[in-house]
Image (cartoon, rainbow, N blue to C red):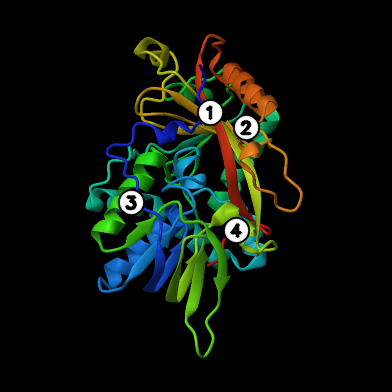
Amino acid sequence: MTSSHPLWWEDVPARITRPRISGDLDADVAVVGAGFTGLWTARELLRRDPHLRVVILEAEHVGYGASGRNGGWASALFPVSLDVVSRDYSPEHALTFTRFLHRAVAELGAALDEDLIDADFVQGGTLTVARHEIQAERLRAEERDAHERGLSDDDLRWLPVDELESRVRLRGARGALYSPHCARLHPGKLVHGLARRVEELGAHIYEGSRVTRLLGATPNRRAQVLTTTGRVRADIVVRATEGYTPALGPRRTVVPIYSLMIATEPLDESWWSERGFNQAETFADARHLIIYGQRTADNRLAFGGRGAPYHFGSGVDPRFDHHSNVFASLRETLVDLVGDRGVEVSHQWGGPLAMPRDHYPRA
């Protein structure tokens, strides 16, 4: 029977159930959301000042949102092209920003080593595969543009079919654009390992503690974070709610976009020997509808994509996490890529992620 829960919620060592908040608490920093954004924020704050009182409030459980449902990529990919960033800011800004994203992938791996978090992190790069000549032309043009703007083959390069097939063999491939600046990982192991680390540093995490209202500071009162079972008074409040942000009021800054995924049963070594992915490369193809995939550490194919409808008024609801037509389309796309209709899907799931309305991240 196919599980409707994310694959990443399984196989997490020593998963902890944490208490809900009860009564009033005082903190220096209150963080709303126990996903990557909130937990990394807490980690960095406590590394800089171990004496800070940091409280993290989570409506469900650690990694419930996009941090526990995503494709398992640590990626330097950006939804706005270098050309657009250059036009909106400057060519120098675009190159600096791109280099920053490249460094971030390697720095994540170093941070996991430092914190002893085993998240199946392997920086094997990513492949965007062309399956039609028009796609190949578009990817080669992207490579030329990147090189003209200061990047090199060490950052992005076109792989002809023979070189691609030494790495990965997908049906109909005519070549691929390869970037080394991407890693495969297990999001569940990462988010739970990170939660344990911030607790070791002194943070307090409360699960099942849904925030209902945020009250800003006044001359006579600290900021307040209200939940159904308690309250936190803090000097600083970090809203790390990503796709669930509209529920707290702000509806114009981000749009909740749904992405859905499937995962296969573990596939045997003979299956993989015909298709590659021996360096843990992540992969997509060059269609305009975004898809993404990886070979997991336990030899599954985890594969996802967009296609779920936007829900009016930035709607977010657990009912939207599953869409039978999208799941069927993902399976057909996967079968088309790997050429094996016999692969069995063991998990299918989805969830919202936050997309800035202009695609530019802000803090």
Q: Amino acid at mark 4?
A: Thr
Q: Amino acid at mark 2?
A: His
Circle 3 sits in a helix, a strand or a loop, which is it? helix
First along the sequence among labels 3 and 2: 3
User: Marks 4 and 3: which is nearer the front?
Assistant: 4
Q: Position of residue 40 (x, y in %)?
A: 38, 58
Label 2 packing within 10 angstroms: few (<14), some (14-19), many (20+): many
Q: Which residue is mark 2?
A: 322
Describe residue 44's horizontal placement relative to residue 322 as left or right.
left
First along the sequence among labels 4 and 3: 3
Describe residue 192's horizontal placement relative to residue 261 as left or right.
left
Q: Which residue is mark 3?
A: 194
Q: Which residue is mark 4?
A: 245
First along the sequence among labels 4 and 1: 1
Circle 4 sits in a helix, a strand or a loop, which is it? helix
Residue 54 vertical placement versus 357 (above, below) = below
Viewer-nearest residue: 48 or 214: 214
Determine the residue located farthest toward the right in the rendered image: 312
User: Marks 3 and 1: which is nearer the front?
Assistant: 1
Q: Which residue is mark 1?
A: 4
Residue 219 vertical placement versus 16 (above, below) = below
Q: Please state the total of marks drawn on the protein image.
A: 4
Q: Position of residue 153 (x, y in %)?
A: 46, 44
Label 4 packing within 10 angstroms: few (<14), some (14-19), many (20+): many
Label 3 packing within 10 angstroms: few (<14), some (14-19), many (20+): many
Answer yes or no: is residue 262 visible: no
Q: Amino acid at mark 1?
A: Ser
